[in-house]
Amino acid sequence: MNKVVLVFLLINVTVLSSIAQSPVEVKRYNVAEAQQGVAVDENHFYVINNHSIRKYTKSDGMEVASWEDTTGLIKHLNSGIIIDGTLYCTNSNYPNSPMASSLEMFDPETLTHTGNHSFGIQIGSATWVDQYEGAWYVAFAHYTGRGSTENKDNRWTQLVKFDTTWRQQAAWVFPEDMIAEFGTRSSSGGFIAPDGSIYCTGHDLPKLYVLHFPKLGYTLDWQQTIDVANEGQGVALDDTSAERQIYGILRNENAVVVSSLPDEP
């Protein structure tokens, strides 16, 4: 009997633990188009599409500004993040090869394009960017099949650290088991939390992967996986909210979803 009770308790603890790792969908916005990702600040969110950006109010989901590339020079915006009053968006020439990327900068108030940093043909296809402890971190994706580069597949995906003058400082690869979950795609979105934990998404699965920088070796340390409401793509941590909330997209529904995350691991 004692063994039965113990097993019952263990099962219940396991179930409760699983529930604790499930996010809560807080809000959903229907938008004109949601292709690649979303950025967020105190009062607005910004939907990133291949060649355009649309700005919406958090309060009622109304579109208040937009930007669209008319030059043909922006091939594939991947994600966005607001840092110190600037909206940074990664841009690549996906699915062309050789891979080339840039970081495009915008004024979030007006969505005026304000700057550019070109990576050129370098490590891969830039998909997401963040800044942590004074350094830049950029995920450079590789793909298997469509969008791949010669003799390389998605195992070549890396997270690269740069200093403020864009000199490479370090780089890490993603765990092989996680790459397998990406299928033929790669890490499409991500951010670094204040505690240094890395949160990233794949291309289309409703999962948020939590990783740590390794103490040994060159492979990021996979800590846990959190089920989320959004389906891969670019995500954003709302650091203006008292709650641990992320913004993500549902491409097939042209929707932005806000999820409340469980406590940090």
Image: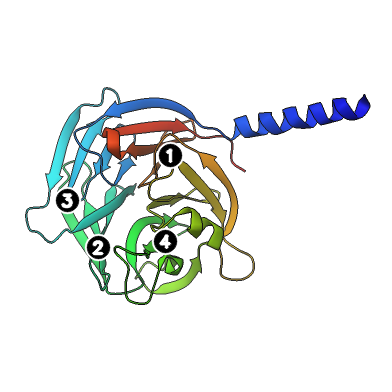
x, y percent for residue 142: 37, 65
Task: Mark 4: give few (<14), some (14-19) or many (20+) Cα within 10 Å.
Answer: many
Under tag 3, what secondary structure?
A: loop
Q: CA distance from mark 2 to mark 1?
A: 32 Å
How crowded pointer 3 is (Cα within 10 Å; few <14, some 14-19, many 20+) is rated as many
Of badges 4 and 3, nearer the viewer stands 3
Q: Secondary structure at mark 1?
A: loop
Q: Is residue 197 visible?
A: no
Pinpoint residue 59: horizontal percent, then vertical percent.
29, 23
Q: Between tags 3 and 2, which lies in front?
A: 2
Horizontal placement of 32 versus 119: left or right? left
Q: Quadrant of the N terminus?
A: top right
Which of marks 3 and 1 precedes in the sequence? 3
In this picture, residue 261 sits left or right of residue 50: right
Contact between marks 4 and 3 (CB within 8 A): the answer is no
Looking at the picture, does residue 113 appear above or below residue 24?
A: below
Asked which secondary structure carries label 4, the reply is strand
Residue where numbered disc 1 is placed:
239
Residue designated by label 2: 95
In this view, the residue in front, 159 or 164, is 159
- Which residue bears the numbered disc 3? 51
Mark 4 vs mark 1, foreground winner is: 4
Q: Residue at x 42, y 25 (%)?
A: 26
Mark 2: few/some/many CA within 10 Å (<14, 14-19, 20+): some
The type of residue carrying mark 2 is Pro
User: What residue is rendered at 20% in x and 26% in y?
Assistant: 62
Q: Which of the image's four quarters has the C terminus?
A: top right
Mark 4 highlights which residue?
A: 137
Residue farthest toward the right in the current orientation of the protein: 1
Q: Residue at x 28, y 33 (%)?
A: 253
Q: CA distance from mark 4 to mark 1?
A: 18 Å
Pointer 1: residues within 10 angstroms few (<14), some, or many (20+)?
A: some
